[in-house]
Image: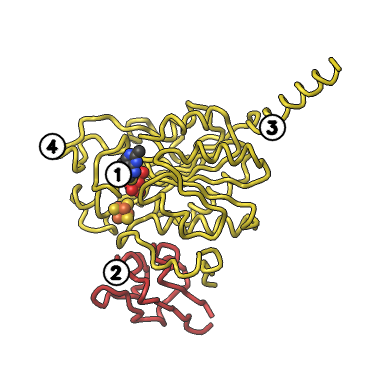
Amino acid sequence: MGIPKIEINEKYCKGCSICVEFCPTQVLQMNGFVAQVVKPEACIKCMQCELRCPDFAIRVFPE
Amino acid sequence: MAFNYEKYIRPGKLPHIWCPGCGHGIVMKGLIRAIDKCALNKNRTAVISGIGCASRLPGYVDFNTVHTAHGRAAAFATGMKMADPGLTVLCVGGDGDGVAIGGNHFIHACRRNIDITYILMNNHIYGMTGGQFSPCTPTDGFASTTPYGNPDPVFDIAKLAIGAGATFVARTTAYHATQIDKLIIEGIQHKGFSVIEILDCCPTSYGRRNKYRSVVEMMKQHKELAVPVTAAAKMAPEDLAGKIITGVLHKEDKPEYCEQYSRLIEKVQEQAAAKG
Ligand SMILES: Cc1ncc(C[n+]2csc(CCOP(=O)(O)OP(=O)(O)O)c2C)c(N)n1
Ligand code: SF4
């Protein structure tokens, strides 16, 4: 199984940091007011970030 | 696989106007997933709201939508459902809209058991107008109009709905994102008035005044306080104080209003025909 593709739409992200805080494997980090993918290889494809992003800004493609 | 929400969003409408961290976006996603899983026809689905931040939701979604007057979603929805009972009708809105100014419409829709699914986003405050207290602001909680703490007791929306006659009543939180669509699906499939209360987060008008440092802190509290209804059944009432009981709280079969109404029409027509 390869590394999932995680897309962050910077035009939609408002920097609430919900995705960063609830990712169980710290795949994401805040970069100022925008979330950023820093460790895609640690992603377990639980989709928690995508489900809880209130801004339709994050999408996880397991492969 | 990433869920394709765009299919149900009106082109060019995102980003939405809700504040960073506002839970209304999480609820809107749950609603879209639920409608998708029910495979509803977009043109045979109506989403109706009153006024408020939560009530902005219909503007984003590509169904038949009506943004009505404050507190009047249930009244408009009742008219639409009665005129076209085959339509799937959903109401969305906040606690202020639904159980303060709209409380009367809400309880009578419950009483009639009309086949509508009402998604009530309870963020404990009037978010849009600057954080005035609502009937769902916790006692001792702070709002712009309760600067010394709220002296009022709180409405339990689920108990209110059950008492008024709703036949499907469920509760979850913005933290429990996957339960949002599950409960909305059950509500849509239930024949009768379904109320799904979603405890929501308003970091701007409520969180800020009530010492939550961030929306994440509010969501973590949802996680900690939630007790599934099956577990709650085995707990003592004193242990349940302050907890959020989640899941399907009430479900029963009772005659549905549009069906009763059409039976009445038939009966009167038969009587008229018999008279000649
Ligand atoms: C008849 C009428 N009275 C008052 C208002 C002002 N008003 C607009 S939104 C709102 C409160 C909405 O609160 P809620 O339904 O809890 O939604 P939220 O903004 O928190 O999502 C009020 C009082 C109005 N628009 N119309
Ligand atoms: S004021 Fe509150 S309810 Fe309104 S958009 Fe902002 S966070 Fe959401």
Secondary structure at numbered mark 3: helix
Task: Find out whether the residues at labels 1 and 4 contact each other: C-beta distance under 8 Å.
Answer: no
**Residue B228 in view here:** no
Which quadrant is the N terminus of chain B positioned in?
bottom right
Rounded to the nearest angstrom, the CA distance separating label 2 from label 1 is 23 Å
Assess mark 1: CB under 8 A from ligand 1? yes
In the picture of the structure, the residue carrying the numbered disc 4 is B148
Q: Residue at x 47, y 72 (%)?
A: A45
In the picture of the structure, the residue carrying the numbered disc 3 is B259
Chain ID, red in image: A
Numbered mark located on residue B85 in the image: none
Chain ID, yellow in image: B
Residue type for callout 2 = Gly
Rounded to the nearest angstrom, the CA distance separating label 3 from label 2 is 48 Å
Chain letter of the residue beneath label 1 in the structure image: B
Q: Residue at x 59, y 41 (%)?
A: B80
